[in-house]
Image (cartoon, rainbow, N blue to C red):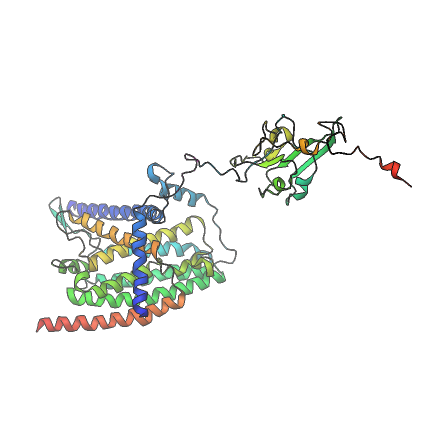
Amino acid sequence: MILWRDIKGTVQPFWVTLRNLLRRPVTVQYPEEQRALPVRTRGRIVLTRDPDGGERCVACYLCSAACPVDCISMQAAEALDGRRYAVWFRINFARCIYCGLCAEACPTLAIQMTPEFAFCKDDPLDMVYEKENLLIDHGGKDQEYNFYRHAGIGVVNPRGGNDDEDPPLDAKSNLP
Amino acid sequence: MTEGLITLALILVKLGMVFFVLLSGAAYLVLIERKLLGRMQLRYGPNRAGPGGMFQPLADAIKLITKEDLIPAQADKVIFFVAPGLATLTALLAFAVVPFAPPMTVFGREVPLVVCDLNIGVLYFLGLSSLAVYGVALGGWASNSKYALLGGIRSLAQLLSYELAMGLSLVPVVLMARSFSLTDIVLAQQNLPFAVLNPLAFLIFLISVAAESKRIPFDLPEAENELVAGFHTEYSGMRFGLFFVGEYINMMILGAMVTVFFLGGWQGPWLPPILWFLLKVLAVAFLFIWMRATLPRLRYDQLMHFGWKVLIPLSLVNVLITGAVLLAMQN
């Protein structure tokens, strides 16, 4: 009967709320009580180093290309041994939306997201992080990974000197 | 001469205490409500300002006062200023007839613990609660905003409709107590409170009181989904705060009315009468808060349907039945 159903549906919820009154709240009291966030949380961005202590970033611009809000910028340069690196690397955290697309795009695992999120500042200019602020001294989520051990450009051996690698081609010699 | 001065002083002290208790009661009712709602939703509620959130009402007041106070360019300024005050004032005035304890003896004279023991107290209360509509209607109209106007008209229709059910559910009380005076009504409940003698009238009164104080599930004036916020859309800062405080004072007063009409007023064993009165008012307030935590908001047509097609016929039938039973008992 519909009337009976209505009355039941009106009275029953009262018991539910009264029961909740006697239960412990599930709230985390934030500043005093800080939860350990999952490793995959997308917080502050860092630049990591490979196991040998070298910078992982090869300044390929993929992160800044993937960034939907254009908050990453850098200047690429090449070292004497042919290894690319970023002369400067800048992230404007006032613009960053913490989407993690840069970390997805990075081929060398250099740019990574950390669970740290509480780093707001009064002045927006203080939110612009330079390379020295971003660079940390370990490998982040994957301490073992070394991009140059796989790609081997210039670092382990001279160009074309690795196993299964042909010497570099002089494109001009191929001209008709 | 000194006799008159002492009487005047006693009246002023009484007035001041009633005023103080009502206002601070309303402020702390907000805190109690937020805390209870929090616990019912498995969170803590305000607990940052002072121990256990004790200073939250103070913090709220500071925030409201220091907020920017906007007045719409085309608003009717005078009425716009007056409306929130009206809403609070009518709520405060209604407390004048509520007896909160039996007469007390101070300096060898009897002081009735009621601001003014009118012999038509019920009518005074009903009249003033109808006047409360003014604050809502004028606030909505003076803002010169379509949303506020629509919200005001809607609240007006709601308040007037439930006024009828409220008045009709009080008729059996007056019949049973054989008096319009609130003190006599309390005294008539010496043996059994009217809530037990006439549960139907109690239920109807409780529901229409919830509607009258614009509380969930009848809080259509605040239906932010359809009407931004209803009649107080254009109000900000302390002016909005006055509407808000008025609502809570209203809640205390209607709680006091439920206590007086149906729960036997100050009467009860063991405890001092004034404590009994306070406990009963707080119990009614708890019921309202509990209702707010539990029930969803009604749709507007459901609200009107419930008021006109269910509550008013039911209360009319109840008047007939109560009258018949009283007549049969007399013979």
The location of residue B234, given as percent across then percent down, is: 47, 55
- Left or right: A175 in relation to A15: right
Residue situated in front as seen by the camera: A150 or B206: A150
Residue situated in front as seen by the camera: A79 or B96: A79
Asked if B185 appears above or below B20 in the picture, the reply is below
Task: Write down the quadrant of residue A50 in the picture.
Answer: top right
The location of residue B112, given as percent across then percent down, is: 16, 52
Provide the major secondary structure of the magenta segment: loop
- Left or right: B238 in relation to A6: right
State which region is magenta.
A24-34
The location of residue B88, given as percent across then percent down, is: 34, 54
Residue B235, magenta (yes or no)? no
The location of residue B259, given as percent across then percent down, is: 22, 56
Residue situated in front as seen by the camera: B21 or B162: B162
Q: Point out the residue furthest to the right here.
A: A176
- Left or right: B324 in relation to B84: left
Asked if B179 appears above or below A153 in the picture, the reply is below
